[in-house]
Amino acid sequence: MINFFLPALTAAAAQPSLWSLVSTSKPISMAVLLLLVSASCFSWAIIFTKWSRLRKARDENRKFLKAFRKANGFDTITAACEQFAAAPLVTVYDFGHAEVERQLRAKQNLTNRAAVERSLQIAAGEEIARLETNMSWLATTAAITPFVGLFGTVWGIIDAFQALTGAGAASLRAVGPGIAEALIATAMGLFAAIPAAIFYNYFGFLIRDISAKMEDFGLEFMNLIERVYEA
């Protein structure tokens, strides 16, 4: 029985490991792998950072909006702004309230509602731009790394067949390690691209949701100042 399995065990032990294939890669193949690993690590760093930031932004938005709707006046809302400073809605409120205060100081009355609306829109735009930071990197990683991996694979296969032409005898055993080494680049490209694509779409959904919340909040803010200053 042992003699029956011995040839299979010997062949398995003789097969090169994944690490040995990577460590013996040619310079160009190694450069491609290092590029893909770097892109993947940077993408995961962005994913973890943005996951935390967006989750906190949504949570703070919800708490601030609840406090805003319960507030009796601007003093109470200002206290809520200090408590939930990470909420994008706080920035929108600050811009709108600052414009209201400027008009009241200048003319003792709210005379230009359009200026307040523009301030709210500017604040919302700045917050969206801040939330979208590094999203382009995720999109680029998702789009480019599969092709970089494919380039590494094609280059490795070319090297493998060039080595085969110089060999005395053509066999799968001779060309197999080179092809396996080349295919690692494709696998690494997909490993970098797939998470980047998934989280790019997911974070885009969250950002669009926050953007819609800011637009709705702008309407609520305008309703508030109409009740307070134009009653």
Image: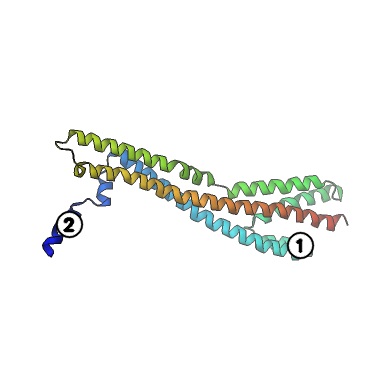
Can residue 91 be seen here? The reply is no
Q: Compared with residue 57, is residue 27 higher up or lower down, i.e. above or below? A: above
Residue 62's spot in the image, x, y percent?
66, 62
Q: Quadrant of the N terminus?
A: bottom left
Position of residue 28 measured from the top left corner of the image (x, y, whole percent):
31, 38
Badge 1 crowding class, 10 Å Cα cut-off, few under 14, some 14 to 19, many 20 or more, is: few
Q: Nearer the viewer, residue 86 or 210?
A: 210
In this picture, residue 106 sits left or right of residue 158:
right
Q: Which of the two residues, 79 or 220, is positioned nearer the viewer here? A: 220
Residue at figure coordinates x 24%, y 45% from the top left:
177
As helix, strand or loop, the secondary structure at mark 1 comes to helix
Residue sitting at 65 percent across and 59 percent down? Answer: 61
Q: Residue beneath label 1, please?
A: 75
* Amino acid type for the residue under numbered disc 1: Asp
Identity of the amino acid at label 2?
A: Ala
Q: Which mark is residue 8?
A: 2
Q: Which residue is pictured at 79% across the width and 49% down the height?
A: 102
1 or 2: tag closer to the N-terminus: 2
Q: Residue furthest right?
A: 231
Q: Mark 1 and mark 2: span between their CA atoms?
A: 79 Å
Few, some or many residues within 10 Å of mark 2 (<14, 14–19, 20+): few
What is the quadrant of the C terminus in the image?
Answer: bottom right
Secondary structure under tag 2 reads helix
Q: Where is residue 117 drawn, in percent x and y?
A: 76, 47
Vertical order, 90 against 34 (above or below): below
Q: Residue furthest left?
A: 3
User: Which of label 1 and label 2 is nearer to you?
Assistant: 2
